[in-house]
Image: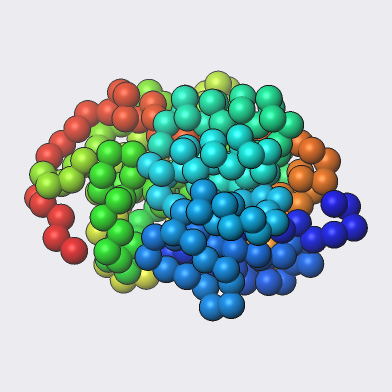
Amino acid sequence: MADKPIRLALVGVGKIARDQHVPALEANPDFELVGCASRHQSLDGVPHAVSLEELLDTGIGIDAVSICTPPQARYEIAAAALRRCLDVMLEKPPGATLNEVAALEGLANAQGSSLFATWHSREAASVAPARDWLSGRRVVRVHIDWREDVRVWHPGQTWIWQAGGLGVFDPGINALSIITQILPQSVRVIDAELAVPENCETPIAASIRMLGDAGAEVLAEFDFLHPGPPRWQIDVECEDGHLRLTRGGAVLEIDGDTPVTAEDREYANLYRRFADLVRARESDVDCEPLRLVADAFLCGRRRTVDAFVE
């Protein structure tokens, strides 16, 4: 396979697949998009079936799948692909539960397949420079301010309000994926408050207090009803300076200097990494961001708020 494109099928052809996955695949010669599976949508010029099983049963040659469905459906699809010895790439979050992801990792290892649990925000342009600047520094406190309008960014996506859909943590987990990548210490949840609409099963707003193992205080505030432009910002205060990431990790500002912006290559980087994993027959499965969300659900106080109306 080393000198041939990896024949890949997309499972789930929604907004994220069309906006991010398809352009990244088209620009990457390591991959050939040979099929897609979706109950309701298709891609022009790409063989289509309503399920991965039906697509595989057509006899089309497939080496790997990229799963872009809601998280509640990912386990069964990924497990079916791994049982056929296919390599699997998972959109974030990698599953609806930690146990599901652990089971998939075990199955991938048993089958000799590559499994890649992706966190696209870790590939934002300024995340690596932020990690490098923070390395060796003593972090005192962190403030995550992650707010957007769900009606703009997730219109009509009812799955997000159902159990396993994460609610405001669907975007909020992006911030958690960044801090678990850049901070020079691990963090644990010590308190949380979840605002859950009376007609939903997942929160529409949340705050989480965390504590780093070196003493850093971390506060995360998430809001799914934020009017106007989104605010995706992380402030990190160190003993000897201040770092700010904005625009979801795309822009870096240190000690108030001129912000540095670089080109967005999040999904291009993810598919480059997936190709490397497939060629090396390796996996990359990090569940720490999902673990923090799970802990927030475990120890968080639930507060019922007004019903959400699309």
The single residue placed furthest to the right in the displayed view is: 3
Q: Number of labelled discs?
A: 0
Q: Examine the rendered structure and indicate whether residue 249 appears above or below residue 177.
A: below
Q: Which residue is located at x 58 percent, y 57 percent?
A: 58
- Quadrant housing the C terminus: bottom left
Between 158 and 167, the residue placed more toward the observer is 158
The single residue placed furthest to the bottom in the displayed view is: 44
Q: Going by the image, does 159 lie left or right of 47?
A: left
Q: Which residue is located at x 57 percent, y 68 percent?
A: 47
Residue 149 makes an appearance in the image: no
Where is residue 204? Give x, y as percent: 25, 48
Where is residue 82? Give x, y as percent: 61, 37
Where is residue 203? Give x, y as percent: 25, 43
Quadrant assignment, res 41: bottom left
Residue 5 makes an appearance in the image: yes
Where is residue 88? Give x, y as percent: 63, 44
Q: Examine the rendered structure and indicate whether residue 148 appears above or below residue 142.
A: below
Between 152 and 247, the residue placed more toward the observer is 152
Quadrant assignment, res 150: bottom left
Q: Which residue is located at x 69 percent, y 30 percent?
A: 111
Q: Which residue is located at x 82 percent, y 46 percent?
A: 279
> What is the basis of the colouring in this image?
rainbow
